[in-house]
Image (tube, rainbow, N blue to C red):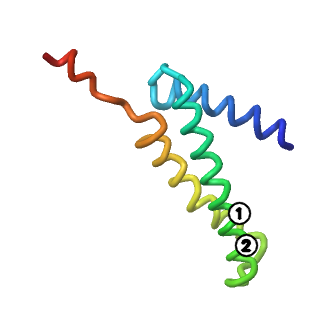
């Protein structure tokens, strides 16, 4: 399962860089921020699962959908505004 997660996250990184956000500039810090974002949304998902199971008593079948409603937009926003943020080249504007 870990190798599958690793391979799919690498594929997500490459597709996001080239196709979704069209940045095409993968470097160490971009990859670092990408995996920090993945880790953060994973922790959010685990936390929400724990809370929904133990405190809110949600039906187990609904918990993954509930988590996806929170983690998917969170992951996208972090990716768009932090990981793959396009910087303005001020020297090219002059």
Residue 32 % position (x, y): 58, 35
Question: Residue at the location (51% across, 54% down)?
Answer: 74
In-image side of 22 versus 89 (left or right): right
Quarter holding residue 64: bottom right
Please report the residue visible at 64 percent of the width from the left and 63 percent of the height from the top.
67
Q: Indicate whether 33 appears above or below 61.
A: above
Q: Secondary structure at mark 1?
A: helix
Q: Which mark is residue 11?
A: none
C-alpha span from label 1 to label 2: 6 Å
From this view, report whether residue 78 is shown above or below residue 10.
Answer: below
Q: Residue at x 28, y 27 (%)?
A: 88
The C terminus lies in which quarter of the figure? top left
Q: Which residue is mark 2?
A: 50
The answer to whether marks 1 and 2 mark residues whose Cβ atoms lie closer than 8 Å is yes
Picture coordinates of residue 23 (x, y %)?
A: 45, 24
Q: Is residue 50 left or right of residue 29?
A: right
Q: How many marks?
A: 2
Q: Is residue 18 left or right of residue 10?
A: left
| Residue holding disc 1 | 46
- Of residues 11 and 46, the one nearer the viewer is 46
Q: Residues within 10 Å of mark 1 (few under 14, many from 20)?
A: few
Disc 2 residue crowd, few under 14, some 14–19, many 20+, Cα 10 Å: some
Say which quadrant the N terminus sits in: top right
- Horizontal arrangement in the rendering, residue 29 relative to residue 6 (left or right): left
Residue at the outermost right position: 1
Local SS, label 2? helix
Residue 49 place in picture, x, y as percent: 71, 69
Q: At 66% from the left edge and 61% from the top edge, which residue is drawn?
A: 45
């Amino acid at each position: 399962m870990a190798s599958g997660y690793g391979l799919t996250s690498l594929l997500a990184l490459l597709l996001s860089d080239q196709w979704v956000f069209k940045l095409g500039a993968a470097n160490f810090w971009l990859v670092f921020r990408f995996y920090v974002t993945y880790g953060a949304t994973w922790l959010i998902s685990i936390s929400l699962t724990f809370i929904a199971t133990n405190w809110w008593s949600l039906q187990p079948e609904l918990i993954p959908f509930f988590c996806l409603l929170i983690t998917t937009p969170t992951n996208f926003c972090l990716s768009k505004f932090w990981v793959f943020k396009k910087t303005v080249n001020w020297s090219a504007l002059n």
